[in-house]
Image (tube, helix red, strand yellow):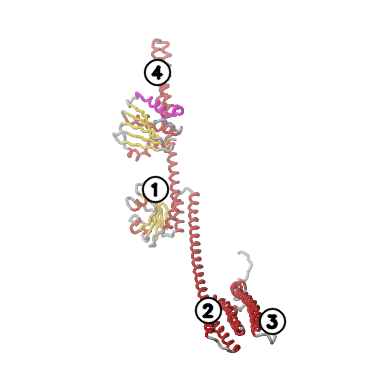
Amino acid sequence: MKAGTTTAPSSPNPQGAGPDRWRLLGGERFYTLARWVTILLLFAITRFMTGTPIWPITTESQPLVMMLWAYAAFSLLASMAVFIPGTGQLISLAYLIDIGFISLMAFFGGDQFAIFFPLYLLPLINAAIRQPPAVSLLSGIAAAVLYIAAFIGWSYLIKQSGVTSIEYVALGLRGLILSMVPWMTSGLAERWSENNRQSVAVAQRQSDQALTEARAYRDQMRSLYEVAYSLSTTMDYRHVLESALRESRRLVPYTCGFVLLSSGNEDELYVAASQSLSISDQSRSLMAGRSGLADILRSAEARTVDVTQQRELQVFESLRSCRSACIIPLRAALRTYGLMVVATDRAASFTGEQIDMLSALSSYAIIALHNAQLIFDLQEERTKLISKEEEVRHQLARDLHDGPAQSIAAITMNIEFIKKLLERDPKRVIDELDKLSAMAKRTTYEVRTMLFELRPLVLETQGLKVTLEQYLERFKGNNAGTQIVLETNEMGDVHLDTKTEGTLFNIIQEAVNNALKHAKAKHIWVRMRSDGKTLHAVVQDDGAGFDKAAVMRTYEKRGSFGLLNIDERARLVGGQADMESAIGQGTKVTIVVPIG
């Protein structure tokens, strides 16, 4: 257990005490200050009106002076009450006493009673701000009655002259003003308060909406981080798919979700990852065919569908209780890996914002699948390169064994035979030496040809065009009787980097060798053409041709990788290669590489 100190629970400040009361009485404090300013003005006015000293007060002091001092004493008590707890209700009614004192001073003011008329407005407006319009109207009427009564009482009781008609009209207008001003002030204050309350409510709603959006954005960023973290810490794309589905559920609650990937068979998809999918559904596969799913696979945009209208999705028992689904194609560049399906039992479709969030999370799944494909391709490339290297070594060994090795062995045997002829039949030595010389020249030619094919030095010094001319020159008068035609008139003065030239030469070399060995062609054309940006090379023959589709289907079981090797070499230098062939129509290999 954690140790701690025990503290008494904090209780709210009692009513009428503490900072809260001081804040609530802020209006009263301002009104008290205004009251004291008014009293100071009354002291000056009273001294001017009476023409007698205001202090000290004696039995001979005028009633107006006595009323002023009584009002000052009341104001002092009211000011002290502001600081005394529990007097809030009394302070709120002090304006009535203010009106009473002002009415008495107007009564004793005599002919100058009009000076006291504006003094009624201060307590009336102060009360109207905090009272409803009806109560403010009653307060104004009460103040008007007292003001009129003070004048009439002074006229009949003290002056004893009565009230004229014009004075009654003036009194009526002033009474109307005293009645209407607090009522209008209260109405305006109430409307202003209502506007303030509406503004506060709107601000509160905006604040709540901003907070909700901030939380949603935080959750979205957290989910993206979780999936990104899974992507950066594992090479298993299935783990990333599971993470994407799990985090999608946090942002867009759904009933069940799963990812469909291609099984390798045409149009067949299988469940690679899932959330809330039954065990039997996890082992299912479906055929996309020409259905709506096939259209989504070919597109690059997410779609919402009615589950009951998607026949392919009905094979999943877990989806039979769902009403709508969001389907996101997992597509990178021109390669489509599969679909992510998120379904809900709600009738309402997915919003645009929810679809955007699902698409953002699915992008990480696409990256994981793309990485997995790249790793698989690299492994395949490695296997092919190793196989090709092994094939080249075997071919080189066969060529050395069948060619130079056999020739050198024959030369050695002829030398021994010539030695014996020198003793037994010297006349035949010259003929045998001629045969030996021809055999040595042929062997030298074969060795140089093999060295040229492995890495022609002329390629580095004189370029691709000259290298092809020298290479194809060696095949003139071949045993198959095939005529090789080199066409470079449209090639122009093209300069390629060393790697591209070497790769292009190797591709042409392999295509020509394949044609010589297998095509049984009468002609082989090697054409070079440049359009300024790319170099086009074509190797075409009029030989037997072959069924390309049938060969590609059995390619993994074959020992040669020549067809794939041509395309792979072209892609290594940023180009591309294409092969066209049909039985009886020859073969055409087209290679396009960038210039510069």
Question: Label 1: which residue?
Answer: 336
Of circles 1 and 4, which is in front?
1
For the residues labelled 3 and 2, the Cα–Cα distance comes to 34 Å
Question: Label 2: which residue?
Answer: 177
Crowding at mark 3 (Cα within 10 Å: few <14, some 14-19, many 20+): few
Question: Label 3: which residue?
Answer: 53
Q: Is residue 126 above or below residue 500?
A: below
What residue is drawn where x is 44% and y is 44%? 374
- Magenta residues (range): 454-477
| Mark with earlier residue (3, 2) | 3
Task: Name the quarter where the C terminus is drawn.
Answer: top left
Question: Label 4: which residue?
Answer: 438
Residue 285 in the image, given as x and y percentages of width and height: 36, 52
Question: Is 318 situated left or right of 227 in this image?
Answer: left
| Mark with earlier residue (2, 1) | 2
Mark 1: secondary structure: strand
Q: Is residue 120 above or below residue 235?
A: below
